[in-house]
Image (spheres, helix red, strand yellow):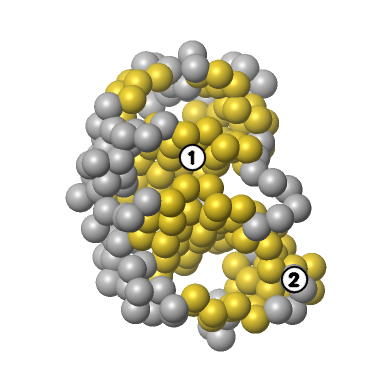
Amino acid sequence: MINADHSLRSIVQGATQPWVRSPLAGVYRRPLYRVGGEQARATSLVRYAPGSAFSAHTHCGGEEFLVLEGVFEDEHGRYPAGTYVRNPPGSRHAPGASAGCMIFVRLRQFHRQDRQPLVVLLDARDDQLLFESEYERVCVQRYPADSLHVHANPRGLELLVLEGELQGEDFTLQPLGWMRLPPGEPLEARAGAQGARVWLKDASPDLGL
């Protein structure tokens, strides 16, 4: 159980967490959120060493991931850094990385009616809507240097800092910094001197349960 209470704010400085071995050789994880054993509802940073791979498996509750470094691969294609992928419940693949990669991944957190596969390349310069349904909204936003941003957050909010820095009244998030806010707790943060680029998900914490 890691950051399992959705009624509390959770913050993890992902870049400073230790890598934890997975059952597969060469695959390591930095857990951000986890409920369950090996077949868990989880959010993690995952690193694949060159030539490593997971055995074929089915995603009962769906999988979404963002490739942060290198090239992620499976039998459906090759996904370079800056690729956002959604594999809906019931999808199956055998992932790996011949040259190594790192991904940000969320498992078993899809709404049961979400059956839409998706592959999107991120725009390196502009704000971008990645996915939207009646249940959730996923986007990437750029914040100019020293700009203040407020999100009302009626449903629940999760974010990962991709570049730069976000500063709140009592927190600072640097690259790979992850935060989850419970419904009703607004996000108020100022971008650092170099600005910030942030992956954001607006969704109920009950999504996928």
Q: Residues within 10 Å of mark 2 (few under 14, many from 20)?
A: some
Q: Position of residue 164 (x, y in %)?
A: 71, 63
Q: Is residue 158 above or below residue 15?
A: below
Tell me which residue sits at (30%, 62%) in the image. Answer: 204
Element at badge 2?
loop
**The N terminus lies in quadrant:** bottom left
Q: Pointer 2: what residue?
A: 144
Q: Residues within 10 Å of mark 1 (few under 14, many from 20)?
A: many
Of circles 1 and 2, which is in front? 2
Q: Position of residue 129 (x, y in %)?
A: 55, 52
Q: Residue furthest bottom?
A: 169
Q: Is 209 left, or right, of 144 in this rendering?
A: left
Looking at the image, which is closer to me, 150 or 179? 150
Q: Quadrant of residue 162?
A: bottom right
Q: Is residue 149 above or below residue 156?
A: below
Tell me which residue sits at (65%, 57%) in the image. Answer: 127
Tell me which residue sits at (51%, 59%) in the image. Answer: 200
Tell me which residue sits at (63%, 38%) in the image. Answer: 121
C-alpha span from label 1 to label 2: 25 Å
Q: Is residue 28 visible?
A: no
Q: Position of residue 114 (x, y in %)?
A: 30, 40
Q: Is residue 105 visible?
A: yes
Element at badge 1?
strand
Q: Pointer 1: what residue?
A: 65
Decide: marks 1, 2 in contact (CB < 8 A)? no
Q: Position of residue 178 (x, y in %)?
A: 51, 60
Instruction: Residue 177: give its label.
Output: none
Q: Residue furthest left?
A: 209
Question: Which callout, 1 or 2, points at the residue further toward the start of the chain?
Answer: 1
Q: Amino acid at mark 2?
A: Pro
Q: Amino acid at mark 1?
A: Phe
